[in-house]
Amino acid sequence: MTKLDDLLAYEVVEGLTEGQFTAEEYVISILKRIEEVEPKIHSFITLDTEGALSSAKLIDKKIREKEDIGQLAGVTVGIKDNISTKGIKTTCASKILENYVPTYDATVIRNLKENGAILLGKLNLDEFGMGSTTEYSRYHPTHNPWNLDYVPGGSSGGSGAAVAAGECTVALGSDTGGSIRCPSSFCSVVGLKPTYGRVSRSGLISYANSLEQIGPICRSVKDLVMMLNIISGKDAMDNTSMPSSPITVPNKSNKLNVAVIKELITDSDQEVAKSVYSTSEKFQEIGCSCEEVSIKNLHYALPSYYTLASAEASSNLARYDNIRYGFDYPIGEYKWDTYFSNVRENFGEEVKRRILIGSYVLSSGYYGKYYLKARRLRSLLRLELLTLFKKYDVLIGPTMPILPFKFGEKIDDPIKMYLVDVNTVIANLAGIPAISLPIGFSNGLPIGLQIMAAPFEEQKLIDASYELERVIDIQRRPNLI
Amino acid sequence: MSMVMIGLEIHAQITALNSKLFCSCRGNYRDLRPNRNICEICCGLPGSLPNINQKAIEYSTMTSIALGCKVPDKIMFYRKNYFYPDLPKNFQITQYNVDGISSIGIDGKYELDDSKQIRISRIQLEEDPGRIVYSEGGMNVRNTALIDYNRAGVALIEIVTEPDFTGPREVRQFLNKLSLTLEHLGVCDTLLEGSVRCDVNVSMNGGNKVEIKNINSFKEVEKAINYEITRQSSVYNRNLSIEHETRHWDDKKKITFKARSKEEEHDYRYFPEPDIPVIVLGSDFVANLKERMPELPNQRFERFKLKYKLSEHTSNILINDKKLADFFESTLKLHFSPTEIANILVTDFKSLIENDNESTDYLKNLKVKPEHIAELAKLIEGNKISRITAKDILVKIFESGKLPSEVVNSSNSYKIADEKTIMDAVQSVFDTEKSAVEDAKKNTEAINFLLGKVMKFTNGRADPKIARRLINSKLSDPEKQ
Amino acid sequence: MISKEDLEHLAQISRINLTEYELEKFPKQLDKTIEYIDILGELASDDSVNLDLQELRFEELRTDEIRMSNNKQLNKNITEDGFLRGPKMK
């Protein structure tokens, strides 16, 4: 029998329901796994052992009393530390929020709790989600479970690494420009950025509101479907959320029209390109058609993304003024001229850079040159993609243009760092859903395939991924012990 | 006389709302302990999102219609970015007119009494900041500002006029009329402390514009303008030029003073609020609202003249006091006698309440109800009491709340129409006022004196017409009985 | 080019103190970033493009009801009277 800590989410729910083990036994096995691997991985910022155990006991009690335990009963979930959890510190990996304890749960957290999920704790990220490696976390970097010298990707690096390392059954991440898909690709797990509006953002600490979504990171497509259905839905607390229909795990194979985005392959590392090509052949093997397409406006996507994301960030992060929450500031230094700037000196370097760029592109005189042009590109790109989706069910390409890299490799050159997001930002700009699916390794380093679909067509992503997952035979668990 | 140009920027809270503009906290923040009317949204806690109030859009649309503005099919919200301790997010969600989509109202016209038109540039819906209190003493608070967020997020309507006013008198007229309109629409109770604020810009002889901020009631606006005109004139007279500057109104010292120069340097970096999608009002929104919307003062004035055949003067007095006009119409429902009832209300009734109409709901607390006035009118018309008696009865009703008929019965105040009784009174006046009788024979004016004496003799109950006739006939024929 | 003065202005409107190290390093880094996004200038200013991706109908908006939050929202820096402390003007 599989070890308890190795179970997938749906297996956990089944096992509990059938009385194979108790929720407490399962949680203890996960906590033991964390104890073993966390010193190597460092995916957690806050671990809520007590909370997890008492939730588990509650579920066991409900099982004994034959009460409804919920669709995710017993499943342990790690939460990216930019999603608000009532009573549990939520730091955004920032010094400025090191003592901040939310007074309310994000809508997705409420959904999870209502369905019996067990919150394990809060996972590492780049400060406020700004970064692609977790090196910009103000606490510590997270290590890639497949090779500890390598970055796990970011910004949801803690989520990707924890799921891959078996420190939690599933995790929630957030994706502003690739922050779910990048670590999913680098850590060889499945991650989905939903259609903009499918999942409520209420409680997600904003980096760039118009681009980001909360999404699941899992070890199987089936788990991902369970998670997605539970966190989706129109929420009265988020005016940008929209209703959607539930996704199902396909019970027959679907013949899809697949298109490979040419530019994304030609601009990738050779090893990555090779792997994606062989996957596109697999699509044909399972009966899908596969063609090549080109995206005209791709060239402008990343500059547009950085303009919009920085602009929104510069405004979103203005609220961190230490008045309502934060650290205690010695009285006597509440001087108008210096207070705000002194307090906000505590932001990390990358956050400061993006705030400054954001202020720059919104300043009078530059607004039309950068911000408006970026929005225009965004609309054009969306239109272009929607046209492609009339002909193709899904568009594919590599999630990341490169393999995971070593710590420190890109940290001194912001542009080099930004460029790794070039494939993923497309979906955020266009508001469309995108998934990253593990397709192989090169020298022991994971490679992910990105699949994109039209708005609210997550079902097509699942159809495509579920089929592929079955035919791709790769190692599912890193050798950590 | 120099040429003066004045423009106004008025902020009126939508006091009619139950909840705030973007959250479900109370709209009425008054008389609550500091920071007890707050939630994660109006406090700008991380991850909270604005959740816009439908009714606020209706009220601001009604205001726009009343001020002759165009209301677009779609509206948008913008962020105005600046740091200030009373602003929880360090940006304000407001509206902005750019790129085709406008604020809730634009390009309006509003007519003053002398049919002069004031152009309304725009009407915006936005959120109120919190409140800052500077403590007088206390060691531990001496160096800090004290902040209360109870008011933060209350819905405000901003009304901006073109600089079309040529003097304080026009401004006063405009503000009076505006208050009345807001009251009729039920949008804003302008008498509530802090419910209206006004910024004024004043320029003379085509010179630089001076902005005066912080005028916290409509009453102070005229004073501030007068002060500023005098100040600017004296600068001109010394051959100095007026600086373009921002000044504040000190309502204790009744002067304007120069703001610190730093406050003027603003680059608000406006951009569309990403958390609120474009709101589609729909093409028949305005037409539908117009049908449901309360009657405006002008419409009511015309109706009073036409339907009730009241004079312009009487109509005006009623219209200018909405609560009195409402009282009038309630009374009419009980007894339809517009002229008589209007007469009672605008003369005796009004003078009795005059000293007390500062409080907002003064008519509610009165013991006199429409029932009383209806009955009083019936008694007058039925010739049961004289108008003079009516006034005394009204005083008694005000004190006791008893119905007029009860008062009349208990005080024996029915009108005396019996000629014999009145003749007795005339006789005794003639007996005591011999010299006046002699005067009256030569000078008809003196008859009024005798009539007065007769009325007094009968406690005002004699029918004055009969009394006058009897006096006249007795003067011409002293022997007549 | 972003001069040291430009950087100081941006830091001022963003209310961020920069360290000596950042003052040294940022101008070049920000320059490179701005140079990178300058490519957006190649795009035509086309007013016919609808910039808004999402719409919300009036009917979908929140109705005007009071729902007081029971949560204690602020736990920091509260005076006895319930005020928060903030920087004082002057």
Image (cartoon, rainbow, N blue to C red):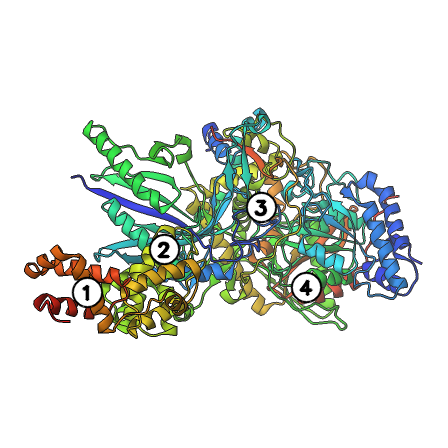
Mark 3 or mark 2, earlier in chain? 3
Residue C30 picture location, percent across and down: 52, 35
Most foreground residue, B55 or A382 = B55
Q: Chain of mark 3?
A: B
- The residues tagged by marks 4 and 1 sit, at their Cα atoms, a distance apart of 107 Å
Task: State the image quarter where residue A193 is shown.
Answer: bottom right
Single out the mark in the foreground, 3 or 2: 2
Dot 4: few (<14), some (14–19), or many (≥20) neighbours within 10 Å?
Answer: many
Circle 2 crowding by C-alpha within 10 Å: few under 14, some 14–19, many from 20:
some
- Reading the image, the residue beneath label 3 is B43
**Is there one chain holding both mark 1 and mark 2?**
yes
Q: Front-most of B157 and B345?
A: B345
Q: Amino acid at mark 2?
A: Ile
**Residue labelled with disc 1:** B426
> Where does label 4 land, which residue?
A461
* Residue B314: x %, y % from top left: 26, 63
From the viewer's perspective, is A23 left or right of B375? Answer: right
Q: Determine the chain carrying the residue at label 1.
A: B
Q: Secondary structure at mark 3?
A: loop
* Mark-to-mark CA distance, 4 and 2: 74 Å
Mark 1 vs mark 2: which is more N-terminal?
2
Name the mark on residue A251. none
Q: Are marks 4 and 2 in contact (CB under 8 Å)?
A: no
- Between disc 3 and disc 1, whose residue precedes? 3
Q: Mark 2 — residue?
A: B353
* SS label for mark 4: helix
